Image: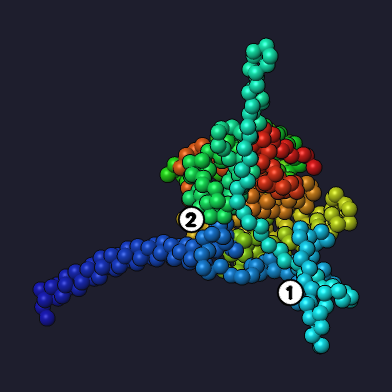
């Protein structure tokens, strides 16, 4: 091979090498791009897996979101061995329909003829009496009272009319009992107005229009201004107040029902906003002196009060991280919180208003150790953001770490509650009302519901009869709660 041929061979090989190198650069770039895309897809997959695995037992999802998959038992973190068989327990008085001492009517049944010889028994000796009582409804119908207001002429020629009873507001009107029952069915039993009208007609024989029923509810709501003011003042002075909020449809738009409550008091309000503007309008948390218990939503933190975070929320989130994603520290934190709760309950039962200092110190040290384990299991990523479980765990760890005093306040101050379940129970009926009766058509209707339900709920908490309390509203009075 001559020099020319050798030169061409070298040039060809050099061109091939350059082509391979260029292709290698391209492949490296494509590989880097694929790796980056794979990282993103892995993160998205982790996020999707986490979302699919979320339920009300391991996250803050509402129970209504679970649908038909709802289990019939508590999550593992909250299960305790009952140590007893199902059904009535030995020594328990049980529950049954008991006879009354003074029945409304007594009917005597006597045998006519002897079962042996056939002789008459009309004057025979009574040797024993067996009593059986039947509890039955009387015939239901409207009880109509006619008030005849006389006008009399004096010998002086002046005519004077008798005073009209307060209940007789028109030539024909519904009495306080009927109106109280309408409000009870609409607000407390969440019965739609059309079905209420059918019930009054079918059961009581009273024809009541839907418009009249709505007017009765509006009348009751308008009579509760003093009640709402008193409850607001009592909550401001309460040792602990629970707060929560939930969405509701009002006039075809999203609104928010806020609750401020305690074991003895309930105050609901409906507002177009969810955050601080609505809370300020409610007028409780901004002026309270006690502990505010809530789920940790950021607007609550803007108020300069003592805070207690809801540990039921923490247990659900820890359940999801520990069980679904197998992070051991989460199970340790669940055990710690429940142990601290048991310690507080034992101290309370023993008549103490605080934990032993060594016990409280042990809880705090153990808490710090578990948080440190959590951060070790979820280190900050070198590049980009956390995905899936690591992001969820990091968010929860940040709250548990930076707000540990507010997580454990129930252990250091017995005024605080372990969870915010009180508020969740009191606001849950809003969802029931929306599902059964539908959304509120007007802001005024939403306000009436919130005001009347606050009244009914507070009466129930303080052992008052609901129907008598509602009847008072139509008789010119109002029931007011006490501090204890």
Secondary structure found at label 1: loop
Q: Which mark is drawn over residue 87?
A: 1
Q: Determine the image quadrant of residue 266.
A: top right
Taking the image as shown, residue 354 lies to the left or right of residue 159, namely right
Residue 210: x and y in percent read 48, 44
Whether residue 237 is visible, yes or no, is yes
Q: Residue at x 66, y 59 (%)?
A: 137
- Residue drawn at x 76%, y 60% is 105
Where is 97 relative to 467, above or below?
below
Which residue is pictured at 51% across the width and 65% down the height?
A: 67
Decide if residue 278 is in sight here.
no
Residue 284 falls left or right of residue 19: right
Foreground tag (2 vs 1):
1
Q: Quadrant of the C terminus?
A: top right
Q: As drawn, is 83 to the left or to the right of 277?
A: right
Where does residue 82 sit, x and y in percent of width and height? 76, 72
Query: Mark 2 falls on what kind of element?
Result: loop
Instruction: Tell me which residue sits at (73%, 61%) in the image.
Output: 338
x and y percentages locating residue 241 in the rendered image: 70, 43
- Residue extending farthest bottom: 116
Residue hosting label 2: 385
Front-most of 369 and 291?
Answer: 291
Splitting the image into 4 quarters, where does residue 454 fall? top right
User: What label does residue 315 carry, if any?
Assistant: none
x then y, percent, for residue 57 = 60, 63
Task: Compare marks 2 and 1 and give the one earlier in the sequence.
Answer: 1
- Give the Cα distance between marks 2 and 1: 52 Å
Assess whether mark 1 and mark 2 are in contact (beta carbons under 8 angstroms).
no
């Amino acid at each position: 091979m001559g020099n020319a041929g050798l030169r061409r061979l070298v040039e060809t090989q050099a061109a091939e090498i350059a082509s391979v190198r260029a292709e290698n650069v391209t492949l490296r770039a494509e590989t880097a791009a694929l790796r980056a895309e794979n990282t993103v897809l892995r993160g998205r997959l982790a996020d999707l897996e986490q979302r699919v695995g979320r339920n009300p037992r391991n996250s803050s999802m509402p129970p209504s979101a679970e649908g038909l998959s709802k289990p019939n038992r508590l999550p593992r973190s909250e299960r305790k061995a009952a140590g007893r068989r199902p059904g009535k327990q030995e020594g328990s008085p049980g529950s049954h329909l008991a006879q009354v001492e003074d029945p409304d009517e007594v009917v005597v049944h006597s045998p006519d003829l002897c079962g042996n010889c056939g002789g008459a028994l009309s004057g025979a000796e009574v040797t024993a009496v067996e009593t059986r009582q039947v509890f039955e409804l009387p015939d239901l119908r409207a009880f109509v009272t006619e008030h005849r207001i006389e006008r009399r002429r004096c010998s002086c020629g002046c005519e004077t009319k008798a005073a009209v009873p307060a209940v007789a507001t028109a030539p024909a009107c519904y009495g306080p009992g009927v109106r109280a029952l309408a409000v009870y069915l609409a607000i407390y039993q969440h019965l739609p107005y059309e079905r209420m009208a059918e019930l009054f007609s079918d059961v009581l024989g009273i024809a009541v229009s839907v418009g009249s029923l709505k007017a009765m509810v509006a009348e009751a709501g308008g009579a509760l201004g003093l009640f709402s003011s008193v409850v607001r003042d009592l909550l401001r002075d309460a040792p602990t107040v629970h707060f929560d909020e939930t969405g509701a449809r009002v006039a075809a738009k999203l609104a928010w029902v806020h609750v401020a409550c305690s074991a003895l008091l309930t105050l609901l309000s409906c507002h177009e906003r969810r955050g601080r503007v609505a809370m300020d309008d409610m007028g409780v948390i901004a002026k309270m002196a006690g502990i505010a218990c809530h789920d940790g939503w950021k607007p609550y933190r803007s108020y300069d009060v003592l805070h207690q975070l809801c540990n039921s929320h923490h247990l659900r989130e820890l359940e999801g991280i520990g069980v679904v994603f197998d992070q051991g520290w989460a199970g340790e934190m669940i055990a710690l919180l429940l142990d601290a709760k048991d310690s507080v309950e034992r101290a309370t039962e023993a008549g103490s208003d605080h934990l032993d200092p060594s016990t409280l110190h042990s809880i705090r040290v153990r808490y710090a150790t578990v948080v440190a384990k959590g951060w070790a299991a979820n280190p900050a990523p070198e590049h980009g953001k956390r995905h899936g479980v690591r992001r969820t765990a990091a968010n929860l760890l940040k709250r548990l770490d930076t707000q540990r005093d507010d997580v454990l306040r129930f252990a250091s101050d017995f005024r605080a509650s372990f969870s915010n379940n009180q508020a969740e129970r009191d606001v849950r009926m809003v969802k029931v009302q929306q599902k059964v009766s539908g959304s509120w058509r007007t802001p005024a209707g939403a306000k009436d519901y919130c005001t009347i339900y606050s009244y009914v709920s507070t009466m129930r908490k303080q052992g008052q009869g609901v129907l008598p309390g509602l009847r008072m509203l139509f008789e010119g009075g109002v029931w007011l709660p006490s501090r204890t």
